[in-house]
Image (cartoon, rainbow, N blue to C red):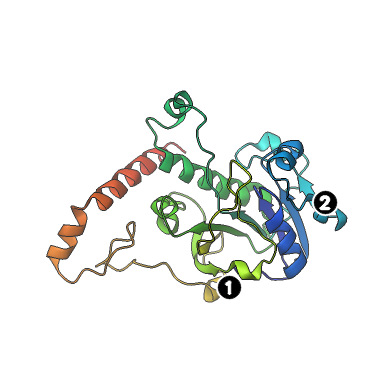
Amino acid sequence: MIIKKKWRILTVGDGDLSFSYSLFKYHRPAHLTATVYDSQSTMTNKYRDNALRSLQQKDVNILFNFDVTNPNSWSTLQKNKFDVVIFQFPLLPAFQSFQEYKNKAEKISVNTLNRQLLRHFLDNAFQYFLDPNGQQLCFITSKDVKPYREWNIENALHKQSNFYYLGSSLFDIQNFPEYKVRNVDRDKHVRDTKGRTYAWTLQKNHALKKELEAPIYQEENCCSMCRAGPFTTEFDRNEHNASKKHQQMVQFEALWQALINRF
C-alpha cells in the first residue's frame, strides 16, 4: 500500500480501529478520520483488544455506526474533504439464518452482494467523500484467494462508471505494526494471507499509476476474470472455457452485469 504524508485519509469499516491507529502512528498522514460500521458499544464488546482509546488520545476523529452504503449515517462527516478513502479487507458478515440467506442472496448470489458493497463504496466515496481538487483516490485491500479472487476486482467494479482502475500494490502488513486483521463477526484474528491494495480514481492519467502494478492477465490469449493463461493453443483455451471454474465466473459476471444495468 502506498501512503503519502500529505494525504487526508478516511478509513471505512475499520472493525477494531487497529488499522487506523497503525496508519496514524507509523505513516502520519496530514489528516485521518476513522470509521466503524458497529456502534461503539458493539465494537468494544466484540473486540476487547481495540485501538479506540489510543486514537482518542491522539485526537483522531472517529465515527461509529458508519454504513458506507447509507447516507443517513454520514451526518457528522465533513463532505468532500479527503484525498484517499481506504476500505481494508471488506467482506459481508455471515448470514444469521437460512431465512436471511433466502431473503438476500438466493437469487442474487453472495458474490454479487459483495461486489455491490464495493461498488457502493466506490460510488459514494467519489461523490461524497473525496475532494474534487484533491488526489481523488479510493483504495480497497483484498486477498488473492477465494472468495475474494472471484469478485474480479480489477475488471468488474468500475464497469459503467465514471472512475478508472489504476492498478495495485502489495499490501505488506509489516508496514503497519499493531494492525490486526479481524474476523468481521467475532473477536478472532484472520490468517495473515498476503493481500493487494487496488486503486481507483476519477483522473485517467493520475500520477500514482506509475507507482502501481498494471492489471494482470489482460492479454488477448488470457482469461482476465479467471486470471488464467496465457493459453498457447486454442485447445488450451477451450479446455479452460469448459472448466467448472470458468463457467462459475461466467455466471458471476452475468449476475453482476444484470445488477449494474439497474444502477
Which of these two is toward me, 174 or 38?
174
Q: Helix, strand or loop at disc 1?
A: helix
Please indicate whether residue 159 sits to the left or right of residue 122 in the image.
left
Q: Is residue 131 visible?
A: no
* Closer to the eye: label 2 or 1: 2
Q: Which mark is residue 94?
A: none
Q: Is residue 231 above or below residue 12?
A: below
| Residue 9, x across and y down, in percent | 71, 59
Seen at 18% across and 62% down, the residue is 237
Q: Label 1: how many residues lie within 10 Å, few (<14), some (14-19) or many (20+)? A: few
Q: CA distance from mark 2 to mark 1?
A: 36 Å
Total numbered circles = 2
Which residue in the protein does label 2 denote?
53
- The N terminus lies in quadrant: bottom right
Amino acid identity at mark 2: Arg
Instruction: Note whether residue 239 is visible.
Output: yes
User: Which one is in front, 137 or 95?
Assistant: 95
In the displayed structure, does residue 70 sit left or right of residue 262? Answer: right
Q: Residues within 10 Å of mark 2 (few under 14, many from 20)?
A: few
Instruction: Say above or below: 114 vs 221.
Output: above
Q: Nearer the viewer, residue 33 or 161?
A: 33
What amino acid does circle 1 point to? Answer: Ala
Give the residue number, with chain letter if any, for mark 1: 207
Q: Position of residue 185 (x, y in %)?
A: 59, 41
